[in-house]
Structures are given as C-alpha cells and as structure tokens.
Image (cartoon, rainbow, N blue to C red):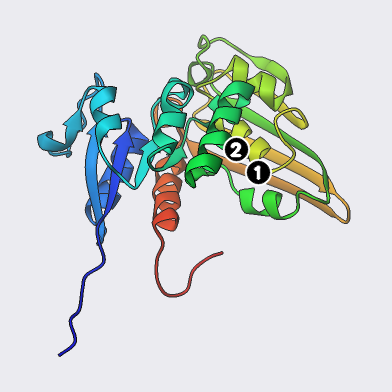
Amino acid sequence: MTEHHSAPQRKIGIIGAGKIGCAIYEALAEMAGVEVSYVLAGRRQPEGVPEALILTDMAQALARDVDLVIEAAVPEVIHDHGAAILAKSDLCGFSCTALSVLQTEQALRAACATHGTRFFVPHGAVLALDGLADGRDVIERVSITTVKSGPSLGLSETAEGAVFEGTAREACLTFPRNVNVHAAVALAGLGFDRTISRVVAEPGKKTMEHHIHVEGQGLEWDIRVASQSLGGVSGAYTPRSAVGTVRRILGGMGVTIA
C-alpha cells in the first residue's frame, strides 16, 4: 500500500496592515498549502485578520520561523531588519526604495549570498519589469515619470508641476514612501544612477499615473499605467498586483506566465 504524504505548509509572515498587507492576507487565507504565521500591525488593527495572528512587536515577528516574509509597511523595515529577515527566510519588499541606500542594498545582497535566500522586488503599480530585466544588456535609456496629487506625494494639496527631476536614486531618497515603482524599474533595468526619474504634482488628481520610456538597440517602448487613488500612496491596481506577485512567488500549477 502506497503512503501519500501531503506537502508541508509554507509559513508566511506579513509586515504591514494597510491596504496591500490586508489584500495579501485575504488571498493567502484562501490558498491551499499556505499558513499565515502572523500579521505585524503596529498601531493599525486590520479588519478580517484573526486576533491570534496579529502582532504589534517587531521582535516577536523576527523570532517566528517562516519561509517568506512579505513587507508592506515602510522602508525603515527594510533598512533596519531586512538583512536579519534574509538570514532566516526569503523576503518580498514592497518598500523597495530602501535599496536606493547603497549600504542597505549591499547588506541585503550579502545576506542573500550568505544564507541562500532571495529578496523579491514586486512590480507594484507598474508593468514590464520582466521585459526590462530580460533586455537589460541592450537597453540604453530608461525614464519614469509619476503624476500624482500633492497629498499622494506627501505634499500640500496646492503642489503643482514638476517637483523632482533627477536620477532614480535621488527620487527614492527624496520621496522614500511614494516612488517605490521608480526603485523597482531601476532594479529591473539600468540601476538607480542610470534611470531618469521625474515626479509631477497635479492638484485634485484622482488617479496615479506612471509613464515609462525605454530605448535600446532595436527597441523602443512607451508604457502608461494609471489607476484610481485609494486615498493614500497606493492606487487601485496595486493591491491586486501585490496578490499576483505573492501567488507567483509561492508557485502554481498548470499554464503559467513566465
């Protein structure tokens, strides 16, 4: 008689209980083969998450043994705890502007190399990071322009016009909580210092728009992505893309987009 052993549950920790963190929890709660070990909520008490899973202390979260940590909070989590997390598990960091600080990027890459873990860069509000990564050797120029309302950039409601022009590294250091897509584009393509960033404030704007222009040997792409603002720094598409990213990380069956 043949014994059938079920695959072990993959344990997941979630840091952050905003719109993205809660969307990811809801998706994981319905996914077979996955166990959410905790949701680190800080001062925000997430709706729909069992009280037994909610933690408010980072030290408690770091002490848990998990296979993957999903960070959907603030860049300081990556700066302060990213290397420690990667010493024990994989990490998907939505606050990837943190990697614009060279010391942080070097620490994360060293932790991955030492412990055989992975840092996943989600595409978030934009598209085509796979194309950028695949074509990196022949791409010669990448620029990204973000257009949001002032409050979505941490600025006043009356902020108007170009509020930043420079490299992606400079943009991420200037707006560390608002331009994660610039960091993702830079990491996928030409890097923080060769990616051109522009941030524009438009009073009363209800959508968040990102325009990516790519030029290279025999290619030229223009990508425009827009989604309705959810009232903070995220647009309506981002929670959906976040769930898709986590599902791809955890793997799947059947016909798969590669």
Q: Report, in whole angstroms, how far the alpha carbon at label 2 lies from the one at label 1.
A: 6 Å
Q: Is residue 212 above or below residue 199?
A: below
Task: Look at label 2 and name its amino acid.
Answer: Ala
Q: Residue at x 46, y 43 (%)?
A: 237
**Residue lying at the far front of the rendered structure:** 114
Which of the 4 quarters of the picture holds residue 161? top right
Q: Residue at x 55, y 42 (%)?
A: 113
Compared across the picture, whether 126 is left or right of 253 comes to right
Instruction: From the top left corner, tell me how far across and down residue 203 is, in percent.
Output: 56, 18
Q: Is residue 132 above or below residue 167?
A: below
**Residue lying at the far right of the rendered structure:** 217
Q: Which disc, if any, is residue 152?
A: none
Which of the 4 quarters of the picture holds residue 6? bottom left
Is residue 125 visible in this depiction of the protein? no
Q: Are marks 2 and 1 in contact (CB under 8 Å)?
A: yes
Q: Is residue 251 above or below residue 51?
A: below
Label 2 CA crowd tier, 10 Å (few <14, some 14–19, many 20+): many
Which residue position holds label 2? 184
Image quadrant holding the C terminus, namely bottom right
Instruction: From the top left corner, tell me how far across and down residue 75 is, in percent.
Output: 47, 23
Q: Nearer the viewer, residue 175 or 67?
A: 67
Q: Residue at x 29, y 40 (%)?
A: 13
Which of the 4 quarters of the picture holds residue 97? top right
How many badges with numbers are in the image?
A: 2
Q: Nearer the viewer, residue 194 or 124?
A: 194
Task: Look at label 1 and name its amino acid.
Answer: Ala
Q: Secondary structure at mark 1?
A: helix
Q: Which disc, if any, is residue 188?
A: 1
Instruction: From the top left corner, tell me how far across and down residue 218 is, in percent.
Output: 88, 56
